[in-house]
Image: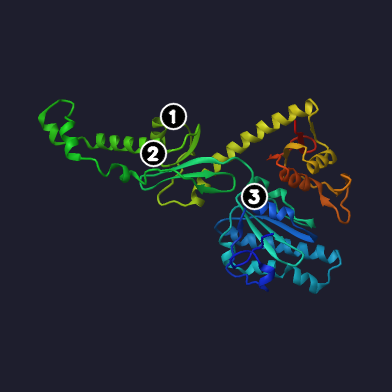
Amino acid sequence: MRFFDTFDGYELAELGTPEVSGMRPLALDRDLFDDLAAHEGSYLISMLIPTHTKGRDVSQDRIRLKNLLASADSELARLGFKPRERRDRLQFAQELLEDREFWEHQAKGLAVYVDDDGRVTPVSLTRSVGESAVIMSVFLMRPLLTALTGPEIPALALTRGEVGLFLVSASSARRAGADLPESFDDVNWFVDRERQRQQHPDRSGTGRARHGHDPADREEEDLSRFLREVDQALPESEMMIVLGDDDLVSRFEHVSDRRVLSSENSGLRAPFTESEILDKADPIVDEMMRDRERDALAGATEQIGVGNATTDISLAMRGAMTGRIGQLIVDPTMDPIWGRVDASTLEVTAHDEREHADVDLVDRVVVLAMRHGAEVTPVTGPTTDSQLVAVTRF
């Protein structure tokens, strides 16, 4: 498992007591998700809060974590931990509260995981999460689903000063390889203006025009040349997010045969960063995720009707353990279903009220389904009366 620290690598246990000033949360990816999901212990602590990237609300984020740490401390006391044991367990997480640099590098959500030895793994989330603190034998993972899942969509950053191709998803924006022109000037620097003037008389055909070329016409030609070269250098794709000023985006739509998706007046300027691309593309990705949710729900509902899907948590859990779930539709914010699982007998016992050693069965279905390669789609709001649909593999 990977742990957060200020050193290269994640061998925190072998390095002794870590320093916790100037820390940054880890970016969520599938490897980190799998590492955390596989970790087991006795009393693992999972804390999740919505966060803010800037402004006065950042100070409220620290207060939220402080309150969750107090809640975790109370729960540890109820479980029989003595004051010193509780202090040792929460020490490094508590020190995050005083780390100003840590709070200056937040996205829309934060997960803070604390293992049995008090080691801390803070995870930055590009999607907001509800505020919660849970202690059980595994880490709570399903709130991270919305920030992790979803398709990668090509996004073209198109400005006169810089051009870049990215792959964006709900959680990240990463540069993609493409032999693109570097800028508008990179395409047009070689244009022979004197030759242009000689070859482009004005509309009246007078000799006077041969000594001057309409600046508006030159601008139009240069822009068209620039956009055509950008389009020709892009890999094939049916649709693409294009970010830039409205003029360049609208011109690119006329040059390219691709379906162009763009937020109104994205306001992107060169130079740009991956975080800016992710932020500008976010509304478009959100809409595509909602379309994906609707399609997944419609398909799952149809499968329920023909007996190829279940909403029963016990059947879903057994399917997840045996790799028989091909698709899982779930609301990551749904209330937990507490219970126990016997991996050897595949027996699943759900409880109306949480009992000692219970885990969140919904969370375990999500983790096991993903581990066996199921397509897991997080949805907003109830999917069915149970808020979970597990579709069997054909």
Give how far across and how far down residue 177 sits, in percent: 46, 45
Compare marks 1 and 2 and give the one earlier in the sequence. 2
Disc 2 secondary structure class: helix
Q: How many C-alpha atoms fall within 10 Å of the one at disc 1: few (<14), some, or many (≥20)?
A: few
What residue is drawn where x is 39% and y is 30%?
Answer: 254
Contact between marks 2 and 3 (CB within 8 A): the answer is no
- Quadrant where the image shows the C terminus: top right
Left/right of residue 137 with respect to residue 258 in the rendered view = right
Whether residue 333 is visible here, answered yes or no, is no
For the rendered model, the colour scheme is rainbow
- Quadrant where the image shows the N terminus: bottom right
Report the amino acid beneath label 2.
Val
Report the amino acid beneath label 3.
Arg
CA distance separating discs 1 and 2: 13 Å
Instruction: Quickly name the residue at label 1.
Output: 257
Compare marks 2 and 3 and give the one earlier in the sequence. 3
Q: Is residue 198 above or below residue 40?
A: above
CA distance separating discs 1 and 3: 34 Å
Q: How many C-alpha atoms fall within 10 Å of the one at disc 3: few (<14), some, or many (≥20)?
A: few
Q: Is residue 361 above or below residue 254?
A: below
Closest to the observer, 352 or 274: 274
Compare marks 1 and 3 and give the one earlier in the sequence. 3
Give how far across and how far down residue 228 sits, in percent: 36, 35
Report the amino acid beneath label 1.
Asp
